[in-house]
Amino acid sequence: MSMHDDVKEILFTEEQLQERVAQLGAQITRDYADKTEPVVLVSVLRGSYIFMADLSRAIDRPVQIDFMSVSSYGAGTKTSGQVEIKKDLSDPIEGVHVIVVEDILDSGTTLSYLMNVLSARHPASISLCTLLDKPERREKPIYAKYVGFTVPNAFIVGYGLDYAEKYRNLPYIGVLKEEVYAD
Ligand code: IMP
Ligand code: MG
């Protein structure tokens, strides 16, 4: 029994992901070319870990990396609406250019909270880079300067995204078969 047997449909192949991540990296490289202050990529754990690793290597300038962990979801597919910082950044961000790297922008609850918290620490600038955007589900207004792909309102997994902590290590992004989702 292979993990891949649980997948109903592949939305983005490894090749499509690599091509888009390379474009985002090139765009960020251009946009930050003449910034003199440090640039830090803030990965929102755990869903963005693979995107962070690939995106950081697609950016051709010095960047620092840091990690945060927040939770707004239980084990299932529905948001609880509450956000909690589980792990904060290792370093201060005052005066540096922050790029928040996220896997998916869904209701916007997590990121609107996070962007407010980080903005209050007086970075030189702050922008948001999300691999996926699910605009149909938005409840909080939020602007992402960098978006990899817009996706339909379906629960998706792979390339870092999980269902109940499984399927993060699928190398592509896809939708699971109905019988796999318990709720
Ligand atoms: P939001 O606060 O509703 O925007 O939720 C964002 C977080 O929910 C993401 O960082 C993901 O961890 C998770 N999430 C939202 N949609 C999906 C999905 O389709 N698959 C896997 N995780 C998701
Ligand atoms: Mg997440």
Image (tube, grey):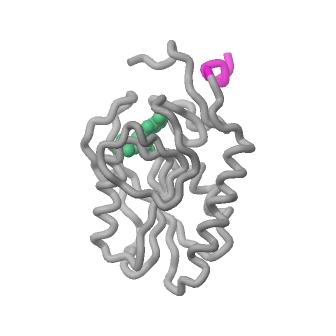
Extreme residue toward the left, this view: 82
Figure label count: 0
Relative vertical location of residue 55 with respect to residue 6 in this rendering, above or below: below
Q: In the figure, residue 58 lies in which quadrant? A: bottom right
Relative vertical location of residue 81 with respect to residue 61 in this rendering, above or below: above
Residue drawn at the location 34% of the way across and 49% of the way down: 110
Q: Residue 76's spot in the image, x, y percent?
A: 38, 28
Relative vertical location of residue 135 with respect to residue 31 in this rendering, above or below: above
Image quarter hosting the N terminus:
top right
Position of 114 with respect to 4 (left or right) is left
Position of 150 with respect to 86 (left or right) is right
Q: Is residue 5 magenta?
A: yes
Q: Residue 81's spot in the image, x, y percent?
A: 26, 40
Extreme residue toward the right, this view: 15
Q: Quarter containing ligand 1?
A: top left
Residue drawn at the location 56% of the way across and 18% of the way down: 177
Extreme residue toward the bottom, this view: 36
Residue drawn at the location 30% of the way across and 43% of the way down: 139
Image quarter hosting the C terminus:
top left
Relative vertical location of residue 183 with respect to residue 119 in this rendering, above or below: above
* Between 182 and 178, the one nearer to me in the picture: 178
Q: Is residue 180 magenta?
A: no
Extreme residue toward the top, this view: 179
Q: Residue 90's spot in the image, x, y percent?
A: 41, 67
Q: Residue 118's spot in the image, x, y percent?
A: 33, 66
Residue drawn at the location 60% of the way across and 20% of the way down: 6
The region drawn magenta spans 1-8
